[in-house]
Amino acid sequence: MEERLFTSECVTCGHPDKVADAISDAILDACLTQDPGSRVACETMVTTDFCLICGEITTKAQVDYAAVARETIREIGYVYPGDGFDADSVEIQCRIHTQSPDIALGTNDAVGGAGDQGMMFGGACTQTPELMPLPVALARALCGRLTQCVRSTDLLRPDGKTQVSVAYDENGNVLGVDTVVVSVMHSADFEIEELRRYIRQGVIAPVLEQYGFCMDRVKHIHINPTGSFVIGGPNGDTGLTGRKIIVDTYGGYFSHGGGAFSGKDPTKVDRSAAYMARYMAKNLVAAGLASQVQVQLAYAIGVAEPVSLRVDSFGTGVVSDGRMTELLRQCCDMTPAGIIRKLDLRRPIYGDTAAHGHFGVEGRPWEQTDLAPKLKALAGI
């Protein structure tokens, strides 16, 4: 059979864009901790020795945004003076104002409408135990392992990237892992060949083994391909909230509506409806109705009910896509208020999503499969 490759990437929590995401979500969590009704749309930019926090926040909470940002930077691991970005010396400026009253008109509790127009996608498949596509699951697991290593040695720094190419046959069955790429920022004291040995044995091998693969059967492995990676983090590249939307979701395996997640409270359907779409897709797969599913939702600003719902099982469904769509309409409240209630989203649960990915992580409310038995019974299978 013809071999086909699909590639996904991921970045660590110390990547500049992820630093920005983490600060925005930490501020969101701080507001929700004191005021669950907070309306937050927080954007962050980080660069050499500088952090700018902008956006619209309407809240009763009393939050020192700069202090939250500084502590987040410290937790990520930027604590080394002289690296061009560290928690103690970074300059932080805030440019925050309240939410537009025009937007608030359509999203208040009386109306309960969506905070913006747009479309959101959720996906699930049987390639991994967490029902995620294998390329992004591997890339994310490699980043998680990198972060663990960063916290266990002062020879590594928080910035890093991974990329995995998986081989499939023409029917979509996994054949194996073709290529693994890992790049990680490091101290000038970490000699490059020693670092490469460390990453092969301490990062790549255990992650592949976790998913049932052997490193010796991977065709290509690239570790810090350009050699030295000493200048990195926000000192090496400016970071912005919302620039890693494909990393945040499915690594390109499923579609993306375009809206970012971090820094947005759950009245913003860019975030909450994407979580709901994942919940619905995962439960359809968990119910055995298909081995691969993509769910699309779309909304109009100020309107509560979605303007469209579409299920695509890519020909893997045991019932029709139309029937699965009907089942979701029957079982799920897809209004912003209904999503918030079902997934209990007015809580400070978002900081961890910026660091470890939004989907495929057990314990998240949208990762539950509690709806699967009902879907299966209603479908009569």
Image (spheres, grey):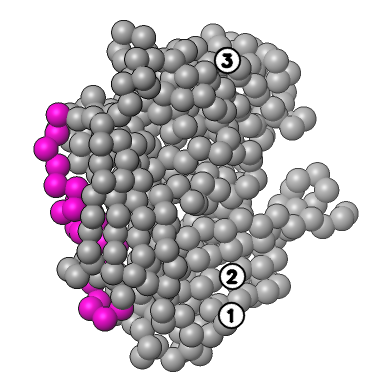
Which of the two labelled residues, at mark 3 and mark 1, occupies the earlier sequence position? 1
| Type of amino acid under label 3 | Val
Dot 3 falls on a residue whose secondary structure is loop
Q: Nearer the viewer, residue 247 or 98?
A: 98
Q: Badge 1, how many Cα within 10 Å: few under 14, some, many 20+?
A: few
Q: Which residue is mark 3?
A: 307
Dot 1 falls on a residue whose secondary structure is loop
Residue 234 location (% of width, % of height): 37, 67
Q: Which residues are magenta?
A: 60-83
Which of the two labelled residues, at mark 2 and mark 3, occupies the earlier sequence position? 2
Q: Badge 2, how many Cα within 10 Å: few under 14, some, many 20+?
A: some
On the picture, is 243 further left or further right than 14?
right
| CA–CA distance in space, label 1 to label 2 | 8 Å
| Type of amino acid under label 1 | Pro
Residue 93 location (% of width, % of height): 23, 55
Residue shown at 31% from the left, 21% from the top:
101
Q: Which residue is mark 2?
A: 181
**Magenta residue check for 79:** yes
* Discs 3/1, front: 3
Do the residues bearing badges 1 and 2 touch, measured as CB atoms within 8 Å?
A: yes
Label drawn at residue 42: none
Label drawn at residue 225: 1
